[in-house]
Amino acid sequence: MAIPKETFFLLPGSEGTLQNQIQQLVAEAILSGRFRPNEKMPSSRKLAKHLSVSRITVTLAYTELLADDYLTSRGRSGYYISENAPQPPKFPVTPREDKVDWSRAIGQKFSGGVSLMKPQDWGQYKYPFIYGQADETLFDRSNWRLCALQALGSKDYDALTSDYFDRDDPKLIEFILRHTLPRRGIKADPDEVLVTMGAQNALWLSANVLLNQRRTAALENPCYPSLRDILTQSRCQVASVEVDSSGLPPDKLPDDVDVVFTTPSHQCPTATTMPIDRRQALLKRASDNDFLIVEDDYEFEMSFLKAPSPALKSLDQEGRVIYVGSFSKSLFPGLRLGYLVGSKHFIREARALRSTVLRHPPGHLQRTAAYFLSLGHYDALIRRMGNAFHERRQAMELAFQQNDLTVAGQGAFGGSSFWMQAPDGIDTEIVAERLRKKGVLIEPGRPFFTNDDALKNYYRLAYSSLPVQKVTDGVALIAQELHK
């Protein structure tokens, strides 16, 4: 008898093509020991009917499994589990009791921070006002797929399979040097650039290279929560500096600071842009007090209201600024691809640290991104996103006026979010939980603050993944909850 077709089912929302999902179902069943050698598979016709897919889809899946020796074909009899199929290892099952005192065994804790938590199923909510998520209606999936296939070609075999050790894809580095950095007014050499696994990895590398227990780091308040966690884990001394309507005030920095972390283009989370005169004042303070600056220049591409101001790094004449850039914000967050720009002495140490932890970001990912960037698809995507974000932003501003909501901070150049302030006495974490039950997601402000007695009436509303048609109704629901 054949394996019952009812054994197979496709989960809604699963990744991959239907053919890949069927292959995975069979392979996992074999590897787990549920399907055994010489057992007969359901016919392609019966399985296709049961799964509500085309027969050719099942046939193609069977053919791939046949090629990998998971299945074997026997004349007109059908498909069977191959005798050569991988078998699950057989180990004696012994009872186990964890007797380790992990409170003593763990030398350093990394959990427990007040971080931003986004539901994994955020896309199922009707009004997701959450930051940093991609909009599939805007992303150029077709050309990204073509670039990925091109990167799999024979002429890119070395880029795909080689161990770069501590180097990066030369094509991606060339694009960053010739196209990305000049748009920010930055000139750099190849040995002054390092590709990272996103901006967060770049911040981690910077903190670990520049800081130790005897050094002091300054960060903005409110700030990017993950940066606060990174600095806490580095065990350095941390000084929190309150931002104002122009971003980080240089005159508020402590005299003994060693490294300053700042977001001058779009302050996180207020989206405030630091004026040129303040940037120059910050650089002068760095020169006078001999400290370094790590500039996180996220979202500079999203300057659709007017041309972006030059990067802080472009004004630096003494090599004191380390620049952090990212493609994950503008392409999609799962890409995890960013870069560091700094003195070759700093980059050498950051490269060595990276090589001990992850060696280098995957070669195929770097080459795919290089093709997507160099073929012009990236610039076309940025224009498309800018137009869509501009329209959503205007709809948000109108909805705020209609519902009497207070904007505490908004970027003068664009961006993808608003920093909001609720009336005094309102805890936005409670509001967020109530709104979630109504299909609305917002981000409470408490995790952004560095002090324990943080103001609880701030929140962030983003529009990167929210269709413009849903803005009015979504904002109205937020206002109703806040006005209760």
Image (cartoon, grey):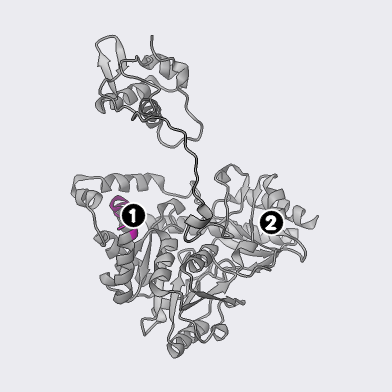
Q: Is residue 366 magenta?
A: yes
Q: Which mark is residue 297?
A: none
Residue positioned 26% across, 25% down in the render: 69
Q: What's the residue type where badge 1 is placed?
A: Ala
Q: Tell me: 154 left or right of 458.
A: left
Dot 2: what SS? helix
Residue positioned 37% across, 68% down in the render: 340
Residue 426 picture location, percent across and down: 75, 61
Residue positioned 27% across, 60% down in the render: 168
Q: Which residues are magenta?
A: 357-368
Q: Which mark is residue 369?
A: 1
2 and 1 marks in contact (CB < 8 Å): no
Q: Look at the picture and state if 241 lies above or below 136.
A: below
Dot 1: what SS? helix
Residue 444 picture location, percent across and down: 65, 59
Instruction: From the image, state whether disc 2 or disc 1 is nearer to you.
Output: 2
Q: Is residue 400 magenta?
A: no
Q: Which mark is residue 429?
A: 2
Q: For the residue carrying disc 1, how many other residues have a C-alpha within 10 Å: few (<14), some (14-19), or many (20+)?
A: many
